[in-house]
Amino acid sequence: MRTLICATASLMAIAATAPACAGEVYVIENGQGKKPVAVKTETSQLAAVPAMPNGERNQGFNYGALYELPGSGTHVMRGHVDPKGSIAIHEGALPYILYVVSGTGKLSLNDKGGEQIDVINYKPDDVIVFQPNTPHGWTNGDTAFEFLGVELPASQK
């Protein structure tokens, strides 16, 4: 019995450290007779991201996909950064729209060598649009930083 209690406590501790999506994800589709129907989809657990692909370390960053629009190359993402956490300088190859749900902090804009060239103070309800290959990093404030992101497909020229 003691082993079961310890195992349960360990699972609860692990679950508490990896935030889950608190809400539901609904996809509105055309059903029979072209009448709209809401389809609830499964949400994924956020996963810890200890480092960026370039090896730079993050602190308290969790990230995961909420939904992929079939055939479009569009992904809806969710992120969480712990209070006083950070996301290392990185750049994405695709356009990305980020909506700040909660938290405040600093978004650094960097040159290709990592040198900071500007800072934006982010806050709830800010929308930040990243063009491809724009180096940036995040330093979070005193409360958790929660965001939604939409990764768009590469533009067709």
Image: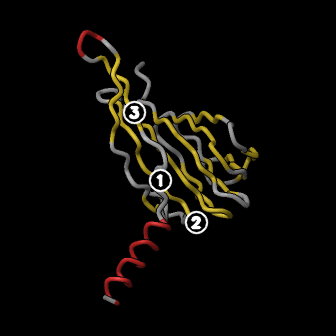
Q: Nearer the viewer, residue 114 or 81?
A: 81
- Circle 3/circle 1 CB separation < 8 Å: no
Q: Which residue is mark 2?
A: 59
The residue located at (60%, 33%) in the rendering is 129
Q: Position of residue 6 (x, y in %)?
A: 38, 84
Q: CA distance from mark 1 to mark 2?
A: 12 Å
Q: CA distance from mark 2 to mark 3?
A: 31 Å
- Give the residue type at disc 3: Tyr
Quadrant containing the N terminus is bottom left
- Give the residue type at disc 2: Gln
Asked if residue 118 shows in the view, the reply is: no
Question: Disc 3 or 1, which lies upstream in sequence?
Answer: 3
Q: Secondary structure at mark 2?
A: strand
Q: Position of residue 117 (x, y in %)?
A: 74, 47
Using residue 124 as the reference point, say whether residue 34 is left or right of it. left
Q: Nearer the viewer, residue 132 or 14?
A: 14
Q: Position of residue 88 (x, y in %)?
A: 58, 58
Q: CA distance from mark 3 to mark 1?
A: 19 Å
Q: Which residue is mark 1?
A: 63
The residue located at (62%, 43%) in the rendering is 101
The residue located at (40%, 45%) in the rendering is 65
Indicate which disc residue 91 carries: none
Asked if residue 130 shows in the view, the reply is: yes
Observer-side mark, 2 or 3, equals 3
Indicate which disc residue 26 carries: 3
Q: Position of residue 104 (x, y in %)?
A: 72, 50
Using residue 132 as the reference point, say whether residue 47 is left or right of it. left
